[in-house]
Amino acid sequence: MASSNFRKRWVRPEVYPLLVPMVTVVGLVSMQLIRNITTNPEVRVTKENRAAGILENFEEGEKYAEHRFRKFIRDRRPEIMPSVNNFFTDPKF
């Protein structure tokens, strides 16, 4: 009974546009949480690592902060749509 009520309410064509951004956001948040738990030098999950206290791991912190995506966008202009920006900022009279 409960599953048919769920289907009647949420599995309709009107809901599909809402599901796409929600699934995307949940995926991005999950990816960031997994990245922080597994690679962040300040997060310690196991008891042995927590007992170590504060460590001076500057190299590990640098490696975490300078990830591949940051290196990829470092030399790029901070624009989302360069052609539209150029059209409005560089008018041709």
Image (tube, grey):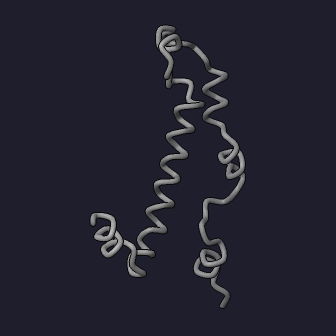
Residue occupying image coordinates x 52% and y 32%: 37
Task: Left or right? Give the position of 8 relative to 63.
Answer: left
* Res 93 quadrant in image: bottom right
Who is closer to the viewer here, 36 or 9? 9
* Res 80 quadrant in image: bottom right
Q: Does 34 sit above or below residue 63?
A: below
Who is closer to the viewer here, 63 or 79? 63
Q: Does 59 sit above or below residue 31?
A: above
Where's residue 36, x and y in %? 53, 35
Task: Left or right? Give the position of 17 relative to 31.
Answer: left
Where's residue 6, x and y in %? 32, 68
Residue occupying image coordinates x 68% and y 52%: 73
Tally the marks.
0
Q: Does 26 sit above or below residue 5?
A: above
Residue occupying image coordinates x 52% and y 52%: 28
Who is closer to the viewer here, 19 or 32? 19
Where's residue 69, x and y in %? 67, 48
* Res 60 quadrant in image: top right
Which quarter of the image is occupied by the N terminus? bottom left
Spot the residue most to the front.
1
Who is closer to the viewer here, 83 or 68? 68
Q: Does 86 sit above or below residue 69?
A: below
Spot the residue most to the bottom.
93
Where's residue 63, x and y in %? 67, 30
